[in-house]
Image (cartoon, grey):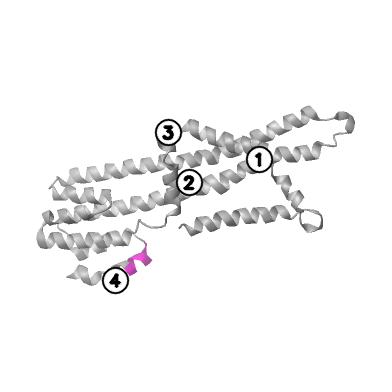
């Protein structure tokens, strides 16, 4: 469970609601006055138009991946560089003792399709340059797909405020059309408030819904790409016959210094065997 996203989203909503409540007579708005910030027509225009534009901008194949994106967003497991380094060091030990062909069994046991593919490339004795080219092309294409997915939410973040303004303009037009000049414009304030609610909804959708989702997905993409680069570098080093201990030290340079200190000591004894 992605607790930081949940805390951030719920906290932002709570702070906004509390902020809305401060401003009435005596310091707090009454429940009836809090209802001033709810307008079904504004919700319909802002949310409905934003969703329709996203649908119009992306193919069905991308839209049907939205549930998968939410699952990735809420899942905090996976993409552990240190665990991958440990696996690669273990593979290097097996290869030094029994040769590259002995890695085939390890590859078949691997759940990660990319990791399995990389192992099989060196088991099949492919040319090193060709194997690296295949691996890097896989990484580039995977990153492009992730970028496309995050782009849906960035699109929503960009168009939601625009449709908030559209809703405001619609409200202002209706307000001016119905304004009773003889009454001195007494209804101007309430009507203006209703029109401006749509701008509020647009900003909320952009910066509290779509923006954080896009940021989280891009962060997950960076984490996955880092792990894949570690796999590529490790597999190519194993094919070249690198020493397991030297391989660990090399791969630890991909992670932060504080992670290296824990990772280097975690299985350092095994690597030295």
In the image, residue 133 lies at what x, y percent?
23, 43
Q: Which residue is mark 1?
A: 199
Residue 192 picture location, percent across and down: 76, 38
Count neighbours of disc 3 (C-alpha within 10 A) and say few if under 14, some if 14 to 19, many if 20 or more: few
Nearer the observer, 40 or 22: 40
Q: Earlier in the sequence, mark 2 or mark 1?
A: 1
N-terminal of the pair, mark 3 or mark 4, is 3
Where is residue 76 drawn, in percent x and y?
Answer: 42, 57
User: Is mark 3 in CB contact (under 8 Å) with mark 2?
Assistant: no
Q: CA distance from mark 2 to mark 1?
A: 21 Å
Left or right for 268, reference 190: left
In front: mark 3 or mark 2?
3
- Specify the quadrant of the image occupied by residue 100: bottom left
- Tell me, for residue 265, which label it has, or none: 4
Mark 2 residue crowding within 10 angstroms, few (<14) / some (14–19) / many (20+): many
Residue assigned mark 3: 60
Q: Residue at x 68, y 56 (%)?
A: 18
Q: Tag 4's secondary structure?
A: helix
Can you tell which of label 1 and label 4 is closer to the viewer?
A: 1
Earlier sequence position, callout 1 versus callout 3: 3
On the image, which quarter does residue 170 sit in? Answer: top right
Q: Does the magenta run of residues contain 258?
A: yes
Residue pictured at 64% horizontal, 56% vertical: 15
Image: magenta residue range:
256-262
Residue at image mark 2: 214
How many marks on residues? 4
């Amino acid at each position: 469970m992605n607790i930081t996203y949940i805390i951030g989203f719920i906290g932002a909503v709570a702070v906004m609601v509390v902020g809305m409540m401060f401003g009435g007579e005596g310091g707090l708005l009454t429940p009836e006055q809090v209802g001033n910030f709810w307008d079904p027509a504004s919700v319909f225009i802002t949310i409905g138009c934003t969703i329709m534009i996203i649908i119009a901008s992306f193919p069905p194949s991308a839209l049907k991946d939205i549930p998968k994106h939410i699952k990735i967003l809420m899942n905090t497991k996976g993409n552990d560089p240190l665990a991958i380094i440990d696996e690669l060091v273990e593979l290097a030990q097996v290869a030094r003792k029994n040769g590259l062909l002995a890695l085939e069994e390890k590859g078949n046991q691997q759940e990660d399709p990319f990791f399995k593919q990389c192992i099989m490339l060196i088991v099949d004795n492919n040319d090193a340059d060709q194997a690296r080219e295949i691996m890097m092309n896989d990484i580039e294409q995977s990153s492009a797909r992730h970028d496309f997915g995050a782009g849906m939410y960035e699109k929503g973040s960009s168009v939601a405020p625009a449709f908030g303004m559209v809703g405001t303009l619609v409200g202002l037009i209706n307000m001016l059309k119905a304004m009773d000049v003889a009454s001195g414009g007494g209804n101007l304030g309430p009507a203006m408030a209703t029109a401006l609610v749509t701008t509020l909804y647009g900003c909320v959708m952009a910066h509290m819904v779509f923006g954080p989702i896009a940021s989280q997905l891009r962060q997950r993409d960076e984490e996955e790409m880092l792990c894949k680069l570690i796999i590529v570098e490790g597999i190519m080093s194993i094919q070249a016959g690198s020493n397991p201990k030297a391989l660990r030290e090399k791969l630890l340079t991909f992670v932060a210094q504080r992670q290296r200190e824990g990772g280097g000591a975690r299985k350092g004894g095994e690597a030295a065997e």
